[in-house]
Image (cartoon, helix red, strand yellow):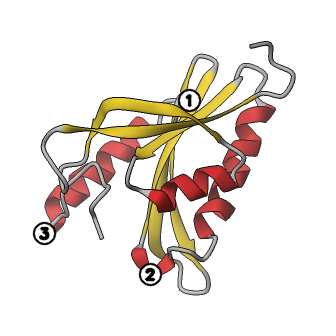
Amino acid sequence: MTKFLSWKPYHEVEPLRRFLANVVAECDSPLRAAWVITLKPDDHAVGMIDSRVDGHRFNFGYVLARRCWGCGYMVEALQPLMDWAFAQREIHRVWAFCDVDNRGSARVLEKLGMQEEGILRQWFVHPNISPLPRDCRCYSRVRAGAVS
């Protein structure tokens, strides 16, 4: 199911190859990292995580094969990333967003201890739903002891 992705499904290998080459090239920056999620023992890709550091903020996005939904894989993959982010002295805020109708992703973020902050109006285009920006829920977790 590609409903909530930020891209349309690939029907040819070459555009996907270019996309992955761009991701790898951008990961040369210390401000961006991406990981492919695999399952043992075959190590076939079942998902991906993309993350960015922006000053004191750290955000991430992810995708997971439908057959792996509800198994706890994404929480298991993201928890070490959250731990790493808060181990960095300069990072005070970890945040992510999901479409208002994407209850599965909202649940993943909640299981990571993130709190919903509110609705980002007309925030993000999900081209498999509409060419227009859609409302998204914003979630965050902030460093313990931070002053509001």
Q: Which residue is mark 3?
A: 11
In this view, the residue in front, 147 or 63, is 147
Of labels 3 and 1, the one closer to you = 3
- Check disc 1: other Cα within 10 Å, few if <14, some if 14-19, many if 20+: few
Q: CA distance from mark 2 to mark 1?
A: 32 Å
User: Residue at the spot x=53%, y=65% of the render?
Assistant: 37
Identify the element where label 1 is drawn. Answer: loop
**Residue 144 against residue 66 in the figure, above or below:** above
Front position in the image: 141 or 16: 141
Q: Position of residue 138 (x, y in %)?
A: 50, 35
**Kind of residue at disc 2:** Arg
User: Is label 2 or label 1 in front?
Assistant: 2
Question: Horizontally, is 5 left or right of 63 in the view?
Answer: left
Q: Quadrant of the C terminus?
A: top right
The amino acid type found where label 1 is placed reads Pro
Label ID, residue 30: 1
How many numbered callouts? 3
Q: Is residue 96 visible?
A: yes
Q: Is residue 79 above or below residue 94?
A: below
41 with respect to 1 (left or right): right
Q: Is residue 50 above or below residue 89?
A: below
Q: Residue furthest top?
A: 147
Q: Amino acid at mark 3?
A: His
Q: Earlier in the sequence, mark 3 or mark 2?
A: 3
Q: Is residue 12 left or right of residue 137?
A: left
Q: Residue at x 60, y 77 (%)?
A: 71
**C-alpha span from label 3 to label 1:** 32 Å
Figure check: 55 above or below 101: above
Can residue 51 be spotted in the picture?
no
Q: Which residue is mark 2?
A: 67
